[in-house]
Image (cartoon, rainbow, N blue to C red):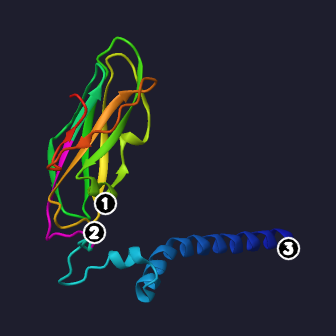
């Protein structure tokens, strides 16, 4: 009988300990959140507060020069039987602002081909201030017969660009890999367009 009584007492203690652990675990989340809010450790907890008069807005990008607007013109040249063009011909951006333009390509041949693009800029001084974060010109591509592709060009114009520059032309010459690599298009006298590549 003593052994049975000891076993029942032990089971009771274990049930109490298990219930206490469950209750502690259940209460741990609100306790943790309250501590974080008091100490300011957890940024997410601070973001959940309802501060009177405050609005949930992202901080402004101070590197964007909103006092200037630059027109970026997009040009596409192809050296071969395929279609290659920008989705839009121009875009107005502020220096420091992230912008994206799409270029469309289609292999209209009845065979597979590998190709790559060469970028150029007009005026030439813009090339060191035109920062591409993503560009199809970084890689070679293989396209099947009739295959279509759309590629993004994500770029930022450095605010250090001369204030005399109001327009930049970004031009790509798309050529088949394995053939003779064409020279990059050359800017014309006005610095507004490019020459030296057929459309």
Q: Which residue is mark 2?
A: 160
Instruction: Kindly check if marks 3 and 1 are in contact, taking CB atoms under 8 A apart as contact.
Output: no
First reached walking from the N terminus: tag 3 or tag 1: 3
Which of discs 3 and 1 lies nearer the camera? The answer is 1
Instruction: Tell me, for residue 55, which label it has, or none.
Output: none
- Measured from the top left, where is residue 167 in percent x and y? 15, 54
Residue placed furthest toward the bottom:
38
Q: Is residue 162 above or below residue 122?
A: below
Q: Is residue 19 above or below residue 172?
A: below
First reached walking from the N terminus: tag 3 or tag 2: 3
In three-dimensional space, the C-alpha distance between marks 3 and 2, rounded to whole angstroms, equals 89 Å
* Residue at x-position 85% and y-position 73%: 2
Provide the secondary structure element on which disc 2 rests. loop
Q: Is residue 72 magenta?
A: yes
Q: Which residue is mark 1?
A: 129
Quadrant location, the N terminus: bottom right
Q: Is residue 66 magenta?
A: yes
Which of discs 3 and 2 lies nearer the camera? The answer is 2
* Residue 43 falls left or right of residue 151: right
Instruction: Kindly check if marks 2 and 1 are in contact, taking CB atoms under 8 A apart as contact.
Output: yes
Instruction: Tell me, for residue 2, which label it has, or none.
Output: 3
* Residue 111 falls left or right of residue 161: right
The residue segment tinted magenta is 63-74
């Amino acid at each position: 009988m003593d052994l049975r009584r000891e076993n029942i007492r032990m089971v009771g203690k274990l049930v109490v300990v298990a219930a206490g652990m469950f209750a502690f675990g259940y209460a741990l989340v609100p306790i943790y959140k309250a501590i974080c809010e008091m100490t300011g450790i957890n940024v997410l907890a601070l973001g959940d507060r309802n501060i009177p008069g405050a609005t949930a807005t992202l901080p402004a990008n101070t590197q964007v020069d909103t006092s200037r607007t630059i027109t970026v013109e997009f040009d596409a040249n192809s050296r071969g039987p395929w279609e290659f063009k920008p989705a839009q011909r121009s875009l107005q951006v502020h220096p420091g602002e992230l912008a994206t333009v799409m270029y469309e390509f289609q292999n209209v041949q009845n065979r597979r081909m590998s190709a790559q693009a060469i970028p150029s800029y007009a005026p030439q001084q813009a090339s060191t201030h035109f920062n591409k974060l993503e560009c199809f010109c970084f890689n070679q591509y293989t396209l099947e017969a009739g295959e279509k592709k759309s590629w993004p060009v994500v770029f930022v114009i450095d605010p250090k660009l001369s204030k005399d520059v109001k327009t930049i032309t970004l031009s790509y010459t798309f050529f088949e890999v394995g053939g003779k690599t064409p020279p990059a298009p050359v800017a014309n006298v006005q610095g507004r367009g490019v020459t030296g590549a057929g459309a």
